[in-house]
Image: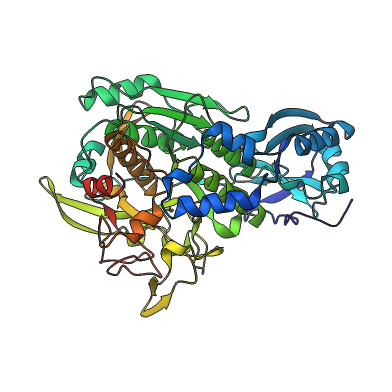
Amino acid sequence: MNDSNQGQPERAALPGSRTVGKTDSAERFAVTFILNRRNPDDFTHRLDAVARGDRSARIGHAEFAERYGASDKDIAAVVAFAQRSGMSVVQTAPERRTVIVSGTAAQFRSALGVDFETCAHPGGTYRRRLGTMTMPAELDGIVAAVLGLDSRPQAKPHFRLRDPALAAVSYNPPAVAALYDFPAGTGSGQCIALIELGGGYEPADLQTYFTSLGITTPPVVTAVSVDGATNAPTGSVDGPDGEVMLDIEVAGSIAPGARIAVYFTPNTDAGFLDAITTAIHDTANKPSIISISWGGPESTWEPATMTQFDEAFQSAATLGITVCIASGDNGSSDGVANATEVDFPASSPHALGCGGTTLHANGTAIASETVWNDGAQGGASGGGISTMFALPAYQNGLRAERGTQSEALTMRGVPDVCGDADPETGYNVVVDGTSTQIGGTSAVAPLWAALIARTNAANGTDAGFINTALYAAAPAPCNDITSGTNGAFAATPGWDACTGLGSPKGSAIAALLA
């Protein structure tokens, strides 16, 4: 073995967890090997053109796989390595640059120089990777990252139930779309992909919900299994079912003509990425928009893993797919004590980070809209400055107001846009047979996904990567939010680290992207 560790040293234990003991050597699990991309320089040139708004630089799935997927030679090398190590190959996906390998803890220990221990935490148990991973010499320059050796829960859903003790107003999602002047239409011909790391939906609940809104032809909802996970409702409103149902009901009620493909996957780094790359390269469902409402502070991710997620979103951009991601519900700290953190994967510069507001209406018009921050309740729009990702060109020259100081952005700023997220001005939904009111930036990602579905259908073309166009527009086609804070950062005219460019002016966005 060589000394390359692919940027993946030993992972610290989750806070609040304890070691149970060494992982059983016979325990079997699957691991995802991410291979390097073919023609990386050519891909970079294409991505740069796409990011500048050149739609002619986009590429189809078949050509993408041929030009920028993993090479047959590299896949064969990983397959041979797995077989020599006594492990089995579960799946090869050249377009996803992925080889999934199944083996025992003892086999991975021997092959990659790592060890494992089992840890207990309030949510259950997980397998922790010990030691620095080393790559066999025959795979040097072939494998970019290995995910799944550690099975900790990687992300949390970004939704919040309203506090019944507090006064509240509520909206049906189509009413929010109307307040934001979404273009007419149903998103017909589009497919919205939802990434879900647990829970499930009951078709009867969806039928009840859409019927209650007068939607006579509800969206077709399809469950897609990734890495063995399935549509598995838990029966708990405040569990992952709340996330799944919120996503489907917001996106589906605003764009009922779009198909909804729900990709269920295990809540691990490998499962999360496998679901995203499966959706991006799904030539059966062909999603034109991906909505993600799960994430966690950047400090809880491995840099090599974040790089691979961002590379997946780069692939989505070149294929003309828009990726909308919730920016988190814990303000500028993202739930990390005594820190300012941004949530990943919303901090990827190749995704549309979606923050949150408190929205009040006066009839059919917006009466007021401020940064979502419910103070003592602990919920607030996620946002701030990344410590991982460089400043993207579309954010050059922007500033963030931290406290009383204005500072120039030198790294990626989050979020890009926003929408209603306060649970006290939240969305009426049905979860596990119960009518309830939910907020959180989890609602904002599918809200924007539905907007893009309507926009794509109206314009007859897929919007794809929209960040550059939104930032370049003067003024931005958004309702500028200038009041409130998310903790460390304050709202200001123009872009800010609480609500980005603002909430959508839907018809103006559709016109911009036409």
The x, y position of residue 508, in whole percent, is: 23, 49
Q: Please say if 98 is above or below 284.
A: below
Q: Given the current orientation, which residue lies at the most extreme bottom position?
A: 405
Q: Please say if 417 is above or below 222.
A: below
Q: Given the current orientation, which residue lies at the most extreme left position?
A: 363
Can the viewer see residue 499?
A: no
Q: On the rendered structure, is 182 left or right of 87?
A: left
Q: Nearer the viewer, residue 301 or 509?
A: 509
Q: On the rendered structure, is 306 left or right of 147?
A: left
Can the viewer see residue 408?
A: yes
Q: Nearer the viewer, residue 486 or 468?
A: 468
Q: Residue at x 18, y 46 (%)?
A: 179
Q: Residue at x 34, y 55 (%)?
A: 470
Q: On the rendered structure, is 491 left or right of 326?
A: left
Q: Nearer the viewer, residue 479 or 110?
A: 479
Q: Nearer the viewer, residue 340 or 53?
A: 53
Q: Residue at x 62, y 56 (%)?
A: 15
The x, y position of residue 252, in whole percent, is: 33, 31
Q: Give the quadrant of the C terminus.
A: top left
Q: Given the current orientation, which residue lies at the most extreme front position?
A: 56
Tell me which corner region of the image, top left, top right, bottom left or bottom right, holds residue 221.
Answer: top left
The image's colouring method is rainbow
